[in-house]
Amino acid sequence: MRASAILPLAALIASAAHASPLTYEQALREAAANAPGVAAVRAGISAAEADARAAGSLPDPRLSIGVDNYPVSGPPAFSLSQDNMTMGRVGIQQDVPNLAKRHAAQAQARAAVATAGASQAARLRQIRLGAGQAWIDLAYAERRLTALDTIVRSLRALPTAARTAVASGTARPAQTLVVDQAIAALEDRRDELVAAVTRARAMLARWTGVPAPEVAGDVPTLDLAPDRLRAALEQHPDMISAEAGVRRAQADVDAARAEKRPDWAFEVAYQRRDPRYGDMVSAGVSMTLPLFTRSRQNSRIAARQSAAEQAGAEREDARRTLGAELEAALADHQMHHSQWQRARQILLSLARERAELETASYAAGRASLTDVIEAKTSLADAELTALDREAQVATDAVRLTITFGSDDR
């Protein structure tokens, strides 16, 4: 065999050896398991949960070491033992923020955990949506390529018939060129479809991490239940994140209000003096005095309340936006489904019947070769259009179920 024939064959064998068949569901699972972005979001959740465990706990105690009543004048100046009030001190101090402030910190931490969880859910949906759309794109790109190859093969038989007709005087010589022109035009379209297959396979590999993925199994029949999709909107990551934002804003208000309550601190100290005088122990309690609430705490409370109102408005805006996007997507899906059915049941059927009739008329001498070529080209257009519309319907279904459905679907 020539080298030019061996090399493509070797490449084909190597590609087949490394191909990894994936069903639609397998593609979604591989994407969710292998996407690098998932690990990053999980790390964020772990960080938020770790912060939540520490939220509201007492601050670390403080150790104090010093010298009390050290004389700097008079007869005992600069002596540690001449004055009975001079002593070394070791003390422990514990700050105790008020309980309302600690509860507010815990609520803020829980809201942060919920926000991180919503971020993970949103990222997972994006990853699953990317993988699902890439799988659908690859499946239908291969179907388009197969359909076009079938048409091209049927046209390749026409040049021989054209030359025979020219030799017999029943056709003009120029008609043989029409066949070659039609085949060349379809070959251009075939090149585009080959590139589309390669692009779709690259995107599927990007989302799943599987090298050289291949489509396996049938295109899934996704159950689109509009009422179930509408009911699942409250569990959408955008709504969970917005709700967490409202809870965080309310916790901020509570924290600002807690500033009007005093914080406490306790201290115990052991004081060592010269052995002639004896040692001492001191204990004390201190508290903050929020006396100027009008110019300090009240302003902060007003600011946090405004932020809470903003968070509530953003939550309602998110709810309305998701609802509008869902209804618009459902309307587009219904439109695309109707167009697909029309293309499959009417346009494709008519184009196939026309191609058959023109071929039969050409065989009977009642139609020209140009008529047959036009009919077959129209059939190719109709088949590709039907597949385009079917692919759009499948893409709509994937986007609706993953974007708006619950995470277990």
Image (cartoon, rainbow, N blue to C red):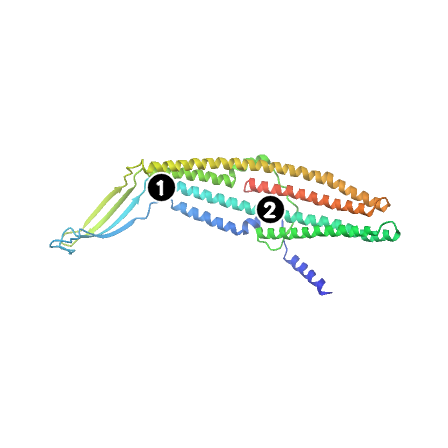
Q: Residue at x 71, y 40 (%)?
A: 344
**Amino acid type of the residue that numbered disc 1 sits on in the rendered structure:** Arg
Q: Is residue 330 above or below residue 134?
A: above
Work out whether mark 1 precedes mark 2 in sequence or the reverse, and give the earlier one.
1
Q: Which residue is mark 2?
A: 132
Label ID, residue 102: 1
Front position in the image: 261 or 292: 292
Q: Residue at x 71, y 65 (%)?
A: 3
Q: Quadrant of the C terminus?
A: top right
Q: Are marks 1 and 2 in contact (CB under 8 Å)?
A: no
Farthest bottom residue in view: 2
Element class at badge 1: helix
* Spot occupied by residue 38 in the image (x, y as percentages of width and height): 51, 49
Q: Looking at the picture, how far across and down is residue 207, in whole percent?
A: 57, 50
Q: Amino acid at mark 2?
A: Gly
Label 2 sits on a secondary structure element that is helix
